[in-house]
Amino acid sequence: MGAVLATDLANTSPVVRHTTGEALPDPAALERFLAEHGTGGGILAHTGRPSRNDLEQVHALRGEVRAALQADEEELVERANTLITGSGAGPLLRRDRDGRWQWCAVVPPGVPLAGELAALAGVGMLGALRALGHERFRRCASPDCEGTFVDVSRAGRRRYCMPNLCGNRLNVANHRARRARRPPA
């Protein structure tokens, strides 16, 4: 969950989405992002609607997460550890809603939303690195994208940071190029 959140957070930036723009333009968009990533139900201590200040802190955080995702293995570990310890969090093993053991980052009371997300992303990145290896931290294969991601798929063959956007866009472009090369009927 943390690695997926880290990937998706890093790719909300207009640096990545240069054709579609900022994916988190306001607190309501941040609230939708959090809901889409299942951060409710006690995953985060932060309750209520995100504020404009939360949004600004999350914007700053995504740059740090993006830098970690793009780093070499040693720097990735250093950056992820900084995300975790900077929030005052420590990773713990706890049961999730389905009774499975999961790593979680428990932060002290009063840590802002961005701090909680930093801890969650940091633990997720370290867990993915340990379980899957650094080769699963990749850049998007689309020539028009600056995205980065952690491939947590079972097969490990993911190529795009946002398959439904980057992958579809490239598939449509390839299809149109093939059709253009066909002789008219």
Image (cartoon, rainbow, N blue to C red):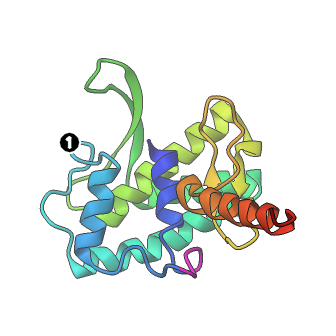
Q: Is residue 77 left or right of residue 99?
A: right
- Measuring from the top left, give residue 142's x and y in whole percent: 72, 64
Q: Quadrant of residue 101?
A: top left
Q: Name the foreground residue: 19 vs 14.
A: 19
Provide the residue designation for mark 1. 42
- Measuring from the top left, give residue 117's x and y in whole percent: 38, 57
In percent of the image, x 26 and y 53: which residue is there? 35
Instruction: Tell me, yes or no, if residue 23 can be seen here.
Output: yes
Q: Is residue 55 left or right of residue 125?
A: left
In percent of the image, x 58 and y 43: which residue is there? 126
Instruction: Check if residue 17 falls in the magenta segment.
Output: yes
Picture layout, residue 90 above or below residue 149? above
- Measuring from the top left, give residue 177's x and y in whole percent: 79, 67
Q: Amino acid at mark 1?
A: Gly
Residue at the left extreme, as displayed: 48
In percent of the image, x 59 and y 74: which residue is there? 16
Picture layout, residue 67 above or below residue 119? below
> Exactly how many numbered labels are in the figure?
1
Span of residues in magenta: 15-19
Question: Chief secondary structure of the magenta span?
Answer: loop
Q: Is residue 46 left or right of residue 113?
A: left
